[in-house]
Image: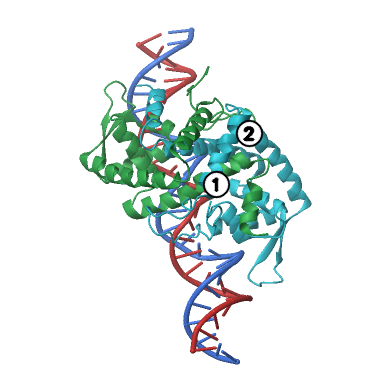
Chain colours: A cyan, B green, C red, D blue
Amino acid sequence: MTLDDKLARVFADDLRELMMISYIVLGNNAVTNRFIERTYQMPVHAWSSLYAIAKFPGIRAKEIRMIFPRPQNTISRAISLLESQGYVRQEASAADGREKRVFATLAGVDILAEMTNYSRKRQAELFSPLSEAERQVFFDLANKIAAGPHLLQSDVMGQDDSQIAHDNVRGAGN
Amino acid sequence: MTLDDKLARVFADDLRELMMISYIVLGNNAVTNRFIERTYQMPVHAWSSLYAIAKFPGIRAKEIRMIFPRPQNTISRAISLLESQGYVRQEASAADGREKRVFATLAGVDILAEMTNYSRKRQAELFSPLSEAERQVFFDLANKIAAGPHLLQSDVMGQDDSQIAHDNVRGAGN
DNA sequence: AAAAGATTGATCCATTTGGATTGATATGAC
DNA sequence: GTCATATCAATCCAAATGGATCAATCTTTT
C-alpha cells in the first residue's frame, strides 16, 4: 500500500475530521513556523502576539493568551522578546497595578506589516484549492465550531484545570 | 472592548481563515494533549503513532511521519517509548536492512481502542455545532485543502528543506 | 566492483516548552 | 481594617522539541 493510500484510509475512518484538521494545521505550521523563525528571528508565538498587540493597542497579556490559546508563560516570554527587539513597549496599567498594557512601536508596526503580507500570500496559497464561495462556506462552518462551547472546555476529556479555558461564551445561545 | 469583541474582530480580518483554523486546532490540542498525557502517560505523538501502527501493521517510521507531519526524531522516540511500554514491537525489514517494520501488540491494540473511544467522543463534542450535512461539507472542503499541492510545499514561504515535505502528490491533477 | 551519493532510523545537544511556583496587587469576607 | 482568596504576569526547572549528525544499509555511477 502506498503512502497516499494510507493517507486516504486515515481520512476515511472514524476519526477523519480530527485527523484532517490536525493534518492541515500541523502541516501548515511546519512550513510557517520555520519561515518566521528563520526570517525574523522570533518564534511564531511572538508574531501572533505582535499581531494582537498591533490590532488592539494596550491589550493585556491575558487577553492575547485567549485569542491564541497558548499557555500563559509562552505569551509572557513572547512579549519580553518583542520588547527586547524594540517591537513593543509595556506600560503599567493605571486601573490595575498587576496588569501591563502592551503597545506596538513603529518598528513593530513596520515589521508586522511585512510579516502579514507574507501570511496573506500564504493563506491564499493554502486555500487556493477552494473557490471563493467554498472558502466562505468553510470559514462559516469553522466559525460555528469555534463558537461552540466545547472547543476549550471538554466534557469527555475531563475537567479542564488548564490555563487555556476561559469564560469565553462566544455563540452561547446560538 | 471585551474579549469576545476582540476575537470577533480577529475572525473578521484579512487573515481570518488562518486564524480560525489555528484557533480551533490549538484549542483542541490543549484539551486533548493534556488528557492523553495525564491519562495514558504518553505524549500525543505516541498515540498518533500507535494509531498508525495498529491501522497499518508493519508500517515504517518514515511513513508514520508523513501521515502525521512531525519531525523524524519525534516519531523515532514515540516508537521507542511505545516499545518500552509494550504496546508495539519492531522487526527488521527483510527487504531493506535500514528499515524496521512496526506492529502493535495485543496490549497496544487494547489501549488504542480505549483511546480511540475517547477521541471519537471528543470529535463528536467538537463538531456538535454542525449538522451531519454540514460536517460532511466541512470535511470535503478540508480534504480539498489537504490534497492541494501547497500544504507542505510553499512557494511564498521559501524553499522547504525541512524533513516534513515529501513527494506526496495527493490530488495532483485534480 | 569500488566509490560516491542517498536513505533509514537513532542519537546528540542546545533551545523551547509548559506546568508549577512566586511575588505583587486586587477583591471579598468578616 | 485585617485576613483569606483570587488574579496578573514573571520566573523556575524538569521534560520535550527539533535541527543536525551519525552509523548502517542500499542505490547509482563509472
**Residue type at the position of mark 1:** Tyr
Most extreme residue toward the front is A173
Judge whether residue B69 can be spotted in this image: no
* Residue found 37% across the figure and 28% down from its top: A9
Question: To which quarter of the image does residue A53 belong?
Answer: bottom right
Residue A95 place in picture, x, y as percent: 69, 72
Q: Amino acid at mark 2?
A: Arg
Q: Pointer 2 and pointer 1: residues touching (CB < 8 Å)?
A: no
In this rendering, would D28 be left or right of B56?
A: right
**Disc nearest the viewer among 2 and 1:** 1
Q: Which residue is mark 2?
A: A122
Badge 2 density bin: few <14, some 14–19, many ≥20, Cα 10 Å:
many
> Would you say A128 lies left or right of C22 here?
right
Residue, disc 1: B23
Q: Secondary structure at mark 2?
A: helix
**Residue placed at 56% from the left, 55% from the top?**
A74
Q: Position of residue B92 (x, y in %)?
A: 27, 29
In the image, what residue occupies the spot 76% across and 49% down?
Answer: A107
For residue B120, side relative to residue B172 (left or right): left
